[in-house]
Amino acid sequence: MPTDAERVQPISSSAGTLAGTRFVRSWPVLPLRLVLALAFGTLGLVSTLVLALLVHHQATARLEVEVGAQLDELAAHMARTLDQGMFERWRDVQVAAALDTLREPGVPLPAKRAVLERLQTTYPAYSILLLTDAAGRIVATSSGLLEGADVSARDYFLAGRERPFVDDVHDARLLAKVLPQAGGEPLRLVDLAAPVHAPDGTLAGVVAAHLDWAWTREAVAAFERTLTRQRAGTEILLLSRDGVVLHGPPELLKRTLPPETLAGARRLGADAAGPRIGPWPDRPAPYLFATEPTRGFRDYPGLGWTVAARVDAARALAPVRALSGTIAVSGLAVALAGAALAWWLAGRLARPLDAVCAQADRLGRGEPLAVLPPTLVREIRDIAQALDAAGRELRQRETGRRLLVDELNHRVKNTLATVQSFAFQSFRGLDGAVARQREAFEGRLLALSAAHNILTREQWAGAGLHAVVDEVLRPFQAGGTRFVPSGPDLRLPPRVALALGMVLHELCTNAAKHGALSVPEGRVALAWEVGAPENGAHRLHLVWQESGGPPVTAPKRRGFGSRLIERGLAAELGGHARIDFPPDGVVCEIFSAVEAV
């Protein structure tokens, strides 16, 4: 057995590697049934996903518009409700200002107080109603509180002397001390006032009503409760003229709403003032919302409030998600059913195709063709008939080819024997250098004959690389330990097999005379690499490396054998060869492009 030092080493950088070798990516080959099942299933699944996306997009757009229209209607209805409610309070104050009991200076104070008390009783949301004199001092109130207080500097008195007046919501000042709110919430009021004129037309005072802001919250809450059946989850917000949230979620209450919250949201229609969708400061998730300003009612001018009706977009559009999910599940079921149907149909189709493939395999191996069962698929029937015709034609050609190859083999052997006989007769009786040339010539003829023998056994269809190497090296093995071949097998065309046999013979002869094979300790490592197919040819890189022989010195001139390898036979191999003479042993490298056989 060879030692570690004698074993073939990986081809080093000096020997080079297969330049430009490409590795073809291998893709899995799937059966027809699986391909069709995957194709039908994928087609059904993709179609379902596309349909679900289209339905989701269209249904979302339509539902957004529908919900937006509902919110727009709710906001408008709430705005009208507030305007009409304030109009009634506006009218109450003006009716009270026209009562003779309040206009006549001589009417006793209890009578005036009784009128104001009855008016508060009719609408409990009034925190207090009061009557002032022309100087701004409170004469009478509905509850008796604050009588005698001076309100001459208050806006409702100053404006109420000239005309009917309404003021926006504000925190109570005097009443906050005498009318504490339940729950500790601050008292907030809306002021209404109207001038009271004496019978002679002079200003007798001002009648004013402080309306508790709670009535607005109660009105909005009652309205929201009616929405549970129509649009659950809808919130009503009330904004002042300046954008301050007067009523709404605690996170937004008394905060000024950024202008972009309303104006910057995406519109759901062509109307610039119509419904929109977008985030709000209290929550980044989008809301569907609509706004409607209060415009007053009849002669009531309004306070410039804005009613906003909003609903969580995810909650409002939940039916669309449910519909998309139903479509996806149904589509998945359809895709699975399509895949199952494709699997069944592919099985019916694959059986005759398998029979045709088996027929093609038998044709390739030269075996008799079987009789295929009938099929309803015309293309498969045509392929089967074409294979039968091809089989008959190939059998006829194979018979002719065998006859021709046998004749050629016979003639080649006769020719080689004749040439060898001529050489023996021509050089008989000669010695010295001429005799050595005769021996070399006869050795080359024998190597060529050995390669011919391999090709003859293979009917000249090619030869295996291992077979060529074994045939040429066998006479020089000396017990099977002189050579260490290493490399994958490769089918060689006849031309390459003959040339490679000649090259190896020349190398063996030279090594037996002058190199590693001339001493018992000498060894030869023969290694080769085969690259992936490229343009129909394999890249073959073969390295012959001698070791353990006598020291090597480079010859002063190239001998016939070296020229034969580097020039003549290298061209036959379709590549190039190089022979180097390092001191520890001859190295020969061969690079060849071998056509696939």
Image: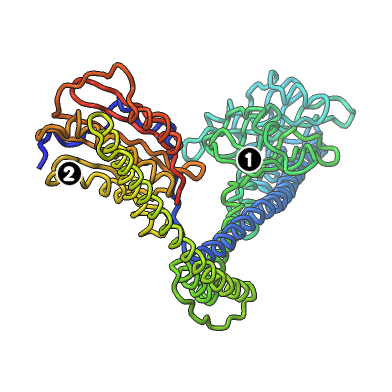
Which three-letter amino acid code belongs to the residue tagged 1? Leu
Q: Quadrant of residue 521?
A: top left
Toward the right, the furthest residue is 200
Q: What is the CA distance from the residue labelled 2 to the residue labelled 1?
A: 103 Å
Q: Position of residue 86 (x, y in %)?
A: 74, 41
563 relative position to 318: left or right: left
- Depth check: give the residue in front, 280 or 474: 474
Q: Residue at x 59, y 73 (%)?
A: 389
- Depth check: give the residue in front, 315 or 144: 315
Q: Position of residue 504 (x, y in %)?
A: 30, 39
Res 143 visible: no
Res 128 visible: yes
Secondary structure of the residue carrying numbered label 1: strand
Residue for badge 1: 237
313 relative position to 490: left or right: right
- Depth check: give the residue in front, 25 or 245: 25
Residue for badge 2: 477
Toward the front, the furthest residue is 429
Q: Position of residue 32 (x, y in %)?
A: 51, 66
- The scheme the figure's colours follow is rainbow
Secondary structure of the residue carrying numbered label 2: loop
Q: Residues within 10 Å of mark 1 (few under 14, many from 20)?
A: many
Toward the top, the furthest residue is 556
- Depth check: give the residue in front, 125 or 292: 292
